Amino acid sequence: MASLAKLLKIQNLLNELINEMQPEDKKTKEKEKPAKDEKNLPRMTPTISKKLEEVVAEVSAWNDKYKKEFADYVNSMSKDDYATKKIEEHIEDYALTKCHRAAQGGGGAEPAPAKEAVTTLTYKELKELKSLKETDDPLVFRTKKGLVTGPDEVSDEDMEDGTFEGAEILIGEKTRRVYNSEEEFMGWWGIGKFKKADM
């Protein structure tokens, strides 16, 4: 009988301990809950809204519903993912999601040039075009038939040394792609800003 009494006493002590701990758990949960509900973007400020509109308008026709969509987009991220980038970078990432939709005819007339297809030509084809007009992108040219660019990089291409405006450059033998001393791509020899250098 003595052992049963001891067991009952221990059980009562355990129950008391459990009861004491439960409110603590609830309090802890209550403390954690607001942190979970805390949003990455608590509210859409006029500054963020204006920036969002500017960036999205470059790739697609603006729609006011994008404000809520963007808020949902950043608030659906984990705290860590959100913290890896600045708000401006998140805006740019979100804007990229609107590119494809606009290309299917959803955009207005103004942003259309940003979605215009760019045709990649061989060096010979590019060089033969007479009416190349430079665009905002120095590596893309406007022609009567649309936007064009030159050949892509060939990894094992031999390079010739050259100079342009007093600086040393490298010129690809096949593609005629021009690189500066840091091996940054600058354009094509005899085309665009290098046109006069080839004469």
Image (cartoon, rainbow, N blue to C red):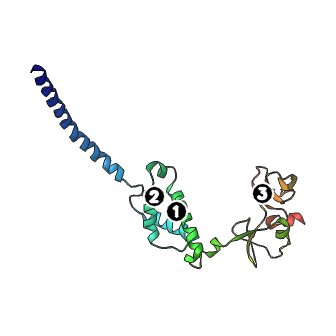
The amino acid type, in three-letter code, at marker 2 is: Val
Q: Nearer the viewer, residue 17 or 73?
A: 17
Sequence-first tag of 3 and 2: 2
Residue named by callout 3: 153
Estimate how packed mark 3 is, as few (under 14), some (14 to 19) or many (20 or more) residues with alpha carbons within 10 Å.
few
Q: Secondary structure at mark 1?
A: helix
Contact, mark 1 vs mark 2 (Cβ under 8 Å): yes
Farthest left residue in view: 1
Q: Secondary structure at mark 3?
A: loop
Could you say where residue 53 lies in the image, as x and y percent from the top left? 50, 69
Sequence-first tag of 1 and 3: 1
Farthest right residue in view: 199
Instruction: For marks 1 and 2, give the CA distance.
Output: 9 Å
Residue named by callout 1: 94
Q: Is residue 25 shown left or right of residue 120? A: left
Residue named by callout 2: 74
Q: Residue at x 74, y 70 (%)?
A: 119
Q: Secondary structure at mark 2?
A: helix
Q: Which mark is residue 103?
A: none
Q: Residue at x 42, y 55 (%)?
A: 40
Farthest top residue in view: 2
The amino acid type, in three-letter code, at marker 3 is: Glu
The amino acid type, in three-letter code, at marker 1 is: Tyr
Contact, mark 3 vs mark 2 (Cβ under 8 Å): no
Residue 60 visible: yes
Estimate how packed mark 1 is, as few (under 14), some (14 to 19) or many (20 or more) residues with alpha carbons within 10 Å.
some
